[in-house]
Image (tube, rainbow, N blue to C red):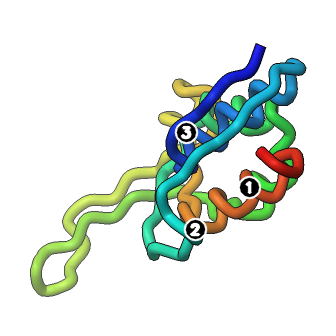
Amino acid sequence: MKIIIVGAGIAGLTMALACQRVGISVKVYEKAKKLDHIGGGILLWPHGARYLEWVGLSECVKSFRLPINRCYILNESGEKIFSEEYAHFYSLIGGEILPIDRSLLQQALVQRLQEGT
């Protein structure tokens, strides 16, 4: 069996890695000639981090880790009007939410794919 994936975004590349991990041949097609840095970021929730670890990106996820421990909301003059610790919330969802640079994650996924994918 061979799987064809259209799009080399985070989802397409992650799916390609998952297929390769279980022995399924995969080919990824992308219309962009080059995957450039677009300056965007994503928030990786615990279940997403666990999935990336499953496809072999544990060290990658840890290297991009920038923990968020507290939330602050400021008014228009910069005064704090709300503050909340995330420890209890993280215990409810089974881990931390990690902000990750989208392009860095995309490049890490590309680097781990088999040649010719």
Mark 1 Cα shell of 10 Å, populated few (<14), some (14-19), many (≥20) = many
The three-letter amino acid code for the residue at tag 2 is Leu
The three-letter amino acid code for the residue at tag 3 is Ala
Task: Name the image quarter holding residue 73.
Answer: bottom left
Q: Residue at position x 53%, y 25% from top? A: 92
Q: Which dot, 3 or 2, sits closer to the camera?
A: 2
Mark pair 3, 1: CA separation: 12 Å
Q: Are marks 2 and 1 in contact (CB under 8 Å)?
A: yes
**As rendered, which of 13 and 96 lies closer to the eye?**
13
Q: Residue at position x 75%, y 59% from top? A: 108
Q: Earlier in the sequence, mark 3 or mark 2?
A: 3
Q: Earlier in the sequence, mark 3 or mark 1?
A: 3
Mark pair 2, 1: CA separation: 10 Å
> Which circle marks residue 11 in the picture?
3
**As rendered, which of 115 and 37 lies closer to the eye?**
115
Task: Name the image quarter holding residue 63.
Answer: bottom right
61 in relation to 91, above or below: below
Task: Pick out the residue farthest to the top.
Answer: 1
Placement of the N terminus among the 4 image quadrants: top right
Q: Residue at position x 53%, y 50% from top? A: 9
Task: Pick out the residue farthest to the bottom.
Answer: 77
Q: Earlier in the sequence, mark 2 or mark 1?
A: 2
The three-letter amino acid code for the residue at tag 1 is Val
Q: Which residue is mark 2?
A: 35
